[in-house]
Image (cartoon, rainbow, N blue to C red):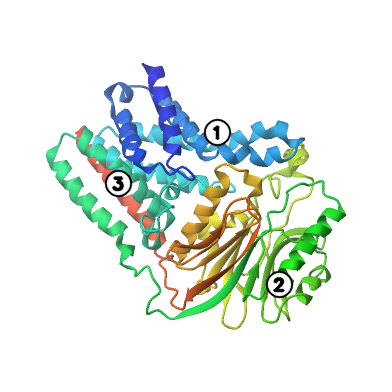
């Protein structure tokens, strides 16, 4: 019987993983979350030991994250030498699964099904918060992703933020469990009223017009240049020159207001701006160029975004680096990792996260997975920025779920910050997204294309990001409520 529980939790995790991009099998959420709730409340299971509950949570996490992070091994598979180390990527899955083990350990304390219903979404969101902030943080694991395919469904992120949307998502799918497993009629009525109010509040951002009619806007024409360059590290100078000429061809022919290339699309190492001047010299009048490159300054390497017009060149250096990709944590103790990640770390960028286009336009830059660190992207200095530009190279994530998840995580930022988002990836998915999260236009994965898009940038940039922090007080209140109901049940 004990083994059966372990198998059921493992399978529950695997099935839950199918709710996330690119699968979006949302109807099964109304089955799998109530089933999980049923398992957690069954008499046979609740009588088992604390270590067994931890193991159950660990297996649930392993099932979920093996599906969600199936792409995690892909960076190792790009090179025949690093391929043999791909097993190391699963250490991240195991590490994050430990938090689910801890969650199930805490849930064992709650013997009242009603209190467990209240606590379960809070505990799962607490997992996200811990995983996103402990050590270097990995905020990729977010239940908010489940609803990211539909702006109407994820509209609550505008008011409640990412963690609020995660809570809404879990509670929404979990709610049928009350009618299936709660025998107390009074509690059913109370929770039904709660659910109706909850749904109203959660979807309250629908009251936003979801259109830009009767709103002052700035209209600009942008071009997304998805070059789909190879990631082959053994390219010679001739290969780099070919890439360079292809970039120049696009620049010469383009007359958009803003032309945007992807992360590290510029093929040469930039030691001073001389390497960039040829791009500037080929720009058409009044076209602004955005392109990613690796640059070197004072013996330090930076992953940089270049913002170039006919007269000036500005840089923004990446400020949130990928552990074991752009630097090795605790390098002196992990020398063996240099075989995989190299002997030189990238340096952290400094300065404000805002870049000007002209006197009337500026943007928030985000390079690669910086876009998922939502709480680090926006502040007093850039909250009034007009839009967001995200340069990335998702070739590292392979052809499976990685590029899609990264895209949908980016999409959520547009609605959360109430700002249009322009995303250009070397191999896709590149897209222009409005401030409601609607996709204006996009370029498919693994396609080479330069797409011209007209976008509208609202002059009114109000958002609720400073109020999103109050969701933590809401979670604390729910946790205390769960404790009270559980204590009342015990007495």
Secondary structure under the numbered disc 2 in the rendered image: helix
The image position of residue 337, as x and y in percent, is: 74, 38
Secondary structure under the numbered disc 3 in the rendered image: helix
Q: Residues within 10 Å of mark 3 (few under 14, many from 20)?
A: some
Residue drawn at point x = 52 percent, y = 57 percent: 410
In the image, residue 444 sits, relative to residue 103, either above or below, namely: below
The image position of residue 30, as x and y in percent, is: 31, 39
Q: Is residue 173 visible?
A: yes
Q: Nearer the viewer, residue 135 or 355?
A: 355
Q: Determine the CA span between mark 2 and mark 1.
A: 49 Å
Q: Determine the CA span between mark 3 and mark 1.
A: 30 Å
Q: Is the Cβ of the residue at disc 2 closer than 8 Å to that at disc 1?
A: no
Q: Residues within 10 Å of mark 2 (few under 14, many from 20)?
A: few
Residue drawn at point x = 63 percent, y = 43 percent: 398
Q: Nearer the viewer, residue 474 or 124?
A: 124
The image position of residue 142, as x and y in percent, is: 46, 47
Reading the image, the residue beneath label 1 is 94
Reading the image, the residue beneath label 3 is 480
The image position of residue 482, as x and y in percent, is: 28, 42
Secondary structure under the numbered disc 1 in the rendered image: helix
Q: Determine the CA span between mark 3 and mark 2.
A: 62 Å
Q: Is the Cβ of the residue at disc 3 closer than 8 Å to that at disc 2?
A: no
Reading the image, the residue beneath label 2 is 253
């Amino acid at each position: 019987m004990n083994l059966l529980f372990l198998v059921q939790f493992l399978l529950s995790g695997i099935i839950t993983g199918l709710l996330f991009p690119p699968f979006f099998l949302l109807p099964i959420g109304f089955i799998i979350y109530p089933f999980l709730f049923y398992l957690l409340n069954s008499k046979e299971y609740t009588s088992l030991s604390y270590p067994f509950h931890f193991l159950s949570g660990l297996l649930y996490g392993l099932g979920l994250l093996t599906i969600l992070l199936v792409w995690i091994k892909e960076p190792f598979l790009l090179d025949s030498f690093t391929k043999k180390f791909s097993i190391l990527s699963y250490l991240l899955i195991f590490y994050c699964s430990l938090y689910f083990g801890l969650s199930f350990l805490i849930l064992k304390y709650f013997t009242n099904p009603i209190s467990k219903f209240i606590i379960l979404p809070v505990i799962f969101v607490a997992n996200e918060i811990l995983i996103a902030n402990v050590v270097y943080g990995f905020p990729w694991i977010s239940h908010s992703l489940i609803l990211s395919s539909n702006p109407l469904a994820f509209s609550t992120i505008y008011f409640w933020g990412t963690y609020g949307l995660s809570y809404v998502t879990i509670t929404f799918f979990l709610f049928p469990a009350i009618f299936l497993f709660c025998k107390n009629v009074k509690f059913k009525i109370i929770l039904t009223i709660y659910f109706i109010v909850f749904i109203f509040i959660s979807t309250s951002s629908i009251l936003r017009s979801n259109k830009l009619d009767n709103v002052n806007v700035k209209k600009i024409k942008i071009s997304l240049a998805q070059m789909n360059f190879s990631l082959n590290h053994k390219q010679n100078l001739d290969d780099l020159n070919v890439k360079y000429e292809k970039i120049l061809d696009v620049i010469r022919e383009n007359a958009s207001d803003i032309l945007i290339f992807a992360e590290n699309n510029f093929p040469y190492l930039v030691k001073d701006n001389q390497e960039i001047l040829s791009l500037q010299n080929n720009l058409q009048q009044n076209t602004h160029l955005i392109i990613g490159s690796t640059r070197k300054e004072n013996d330090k390497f930076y992953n940089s975004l270049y913002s170039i017009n006919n007269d000036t060149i500005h840089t923004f250096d990446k400020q949130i680096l990928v552990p074991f990709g752009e630097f090795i944590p605790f390098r002196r103790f992990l020398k063996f990792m240099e075989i995989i990640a190299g002997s030189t770390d990238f340096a952290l960028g400094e300065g404000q996260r805002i870049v000007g286009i002209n006197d009337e336009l500026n943007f928030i830059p985000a390079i690669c997975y910086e876009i998922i660190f939502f709480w680090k992207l926006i502040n007093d200095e850039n909250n009034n920025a007009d839009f967001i530009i995200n340069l990335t190279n998702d070739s590292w994530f392979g052809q499976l779920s990685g590029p899609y998840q990264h895209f949908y995580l980016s999409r959520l930022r547009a609605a959360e910050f109430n700002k249009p988002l322009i995303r250009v990836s070397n191999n896709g998915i590149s897209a222009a997204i409005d401030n409601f999260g609607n996709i204006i236009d996009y370029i498919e994965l693994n396609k080479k294309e330069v797409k011209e898009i007209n976008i509208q940038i609202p002059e009114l940039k109000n958002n609720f990001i400073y109020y999103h922090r109050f969701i933590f007080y809401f979670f604390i209140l729910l946790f205390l409520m769960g404790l009270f109901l559980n204590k009342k049940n015990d007495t």
